[in-house]
């Protein structure tokens, strides 16, 4: 049994997990900073780094205690190298390096999105490659083919705002709390998608664009205010969610059909969205649709431990010159 301690600190969650054989969860600890950032309506990078510094040691200790393991019982230490907020990433990378060095363990550098795309293995270890992955989070929206363990080919990505970012910005304009995705989902459940906000289809490409939608919602709200016209937040939320979900689900289903892939995997924070899950299922034409439960959609270290197994098996170890990389590209990840 290969036991990997994984550390994730790319954004606003400090997380540590112990994962055996890439899917068996021995411990999973997430210290969220959401209440701290909620005061500012979004993540404040400087505050995030400071919070990670305070949380990283206790979170790792708790994960080891939960697993009932000592450092000497582990086979490797894995850490998110990027992409993400540089100050946040650095805390995890530095801590993981120190831990690996002190314990004489190999160090594994994991791409954050490879982590998201590996999250489904935690609950569906029977998942087979290749699969189509729709990775949608607060900072990334992409369609990728997971060709084999550790091999990802990006087909398209957002040209501007990520899907989660669109949820967050639209929620803020509607006076809903951060993070916006869950708040919009809740509001939308009590509304109707009566407004026809624009969808950027970008013709034949698998790219996305959400900044036009964000502007359209902001313009709509301004117009209502100027004309003193009433609207229901719930209806605007439902309409905006519909515009985002429609494009994401359609492109994911189209990619799976065009590439002849039998399985569609949803990953990243936005994959927690029920409307998105339902829509992909509807459009999947009988293909298997796999998504993690919400706690493994949003940032966590278990997914980093899941993605790290391949690197361990390939003896693809990082050395102690490893540096955090805010813009680590997925293309080079194979
Ligand atoms: O994967 P994640 O935790 O962090 C990044 O890697 O960015 O994703 C966070 C994003 C936020 O933008 C949040 O609003 C969105 O995921 N999100 C959701 C839902 N839950 C979280 N978006 C839509 N519906 C949800 N239920
Ligand atoms: Zn993420």
Image (cartoon, rainbow, N blue to C red):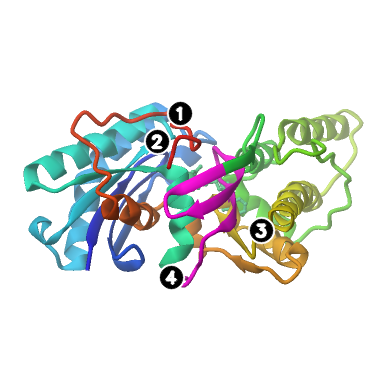
Query: 200 above or below 70?
Result: above
The reply to whether callout 2 and callout 4 are in contact (CB within 8 Å) is no
Residue 125 occupies quadrant = bottom left
Relative to 163, is 304 on the left or the right? left
The earlier-in-sequence mark between 2 and 3 is 2
Q: Residue at x 37, y 31 (%)?
A: 47
Say whether disc 3 or disc 1 marks the residue closer to the N-terminus. Answer: 3
Residue 171 against residue 305 in the figure, above or below? above
Q: Which residue is mark 1?
A: 327
2 vs 3, front mark: 2
Residue 104: mark in rendering: none
What separation in Å lies between label 3 and label 1 (alpha carbons)? 32 Å
The numbered mark, 2 or 4, whose residue comes first in the sequence reads 2
Q: Disc 3 designates what residue?
A: 186
Q: Which disc is residue 125 wearing?
A: 4
Residue 191, horizontal then vertical, whole percent: 79, 58
Q: Position of residue 297 (x, y in %)?
A: 50, 56
Q: Are marks 2 and 1 in contact (CB under 8 Å)?
A: yes
User: Left or right: where does residue 147 sit relative to residue 68?
Assistant: right
C-alpha separation, residue under disc 2 versus residue under disc 3: 31 Å
The reply to whether residue 8 is in sight is: yes
Does mark 4 have its CB less than 8 Å from ligand 2? no
| Marks 1, 4: nearer the viewer | 4
């Amino acid at each position: 049994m290969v036991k990997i301690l994984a550390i994730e600190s790319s954004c606003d969650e400090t997380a540590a997990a112990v994962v055996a054989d890439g899917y068996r969860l021995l411990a999973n600890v997430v210290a969220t900073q959401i209440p701290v950032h909620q005061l500012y309506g979004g993540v404040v990078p400087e505050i995030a780094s400071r919070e990670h510094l305070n949380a990283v040691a206790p979170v790792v200790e708790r994960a080891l205690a939960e697993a009932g393991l000592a450092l000497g019982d582990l086979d490797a230490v894995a850490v998110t190298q990027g992409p993400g907020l540089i100050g946040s990433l650095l805390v995890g990378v530095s801590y993981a390096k120190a831990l690996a060095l002190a314990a004489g363990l190999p160090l594994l550098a994991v791409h954050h999105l490879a982590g998201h795309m590996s999250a489904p293995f935690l609950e569906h270890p029977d998942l087979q490659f290749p699969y189509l992955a729709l990775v949608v989070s607060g900072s990334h929206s992409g369609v990728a083919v997971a060709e084999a363990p550790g091999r990802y080919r990006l087909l398209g990505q957002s040209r501007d705002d990520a899907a989660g970012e669109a949820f967050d910005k639209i929620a803020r304009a509607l006076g809903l709390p951060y993070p916006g995705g869950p708040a919009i989902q809740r509001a939308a459940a009590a509304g109707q998608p009566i407004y026809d906000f624009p969808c950027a289809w970008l013709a034949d490409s698998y790219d996305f664009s959400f900044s036009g939608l964000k502007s359209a919602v902001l313009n709509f709200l301004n117009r209502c205010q100027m004309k003193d016209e009433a609207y229901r937040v719930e209806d605007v939320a439902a309409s905006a969610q519909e515009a985002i979900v429609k494009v994401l689900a359609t492109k994911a289903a189209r990619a799976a059909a065009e590439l002849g892939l039998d399985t569609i995997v949803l990953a990243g924070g936005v994959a927690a969205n029920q409307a998105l899950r339902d829509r992909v299922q509807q459009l999947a034409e009988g293909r298997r649709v796999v998504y993690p439960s919400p706690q493994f959609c949003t940032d966590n270290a278990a997914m980093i431990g899941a993605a790290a197994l391949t690197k361990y098996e390939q003896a693809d170890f990082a050395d102690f010159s490893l540096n955090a990389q805010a813009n680590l590209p997925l293309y080079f990840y194979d």
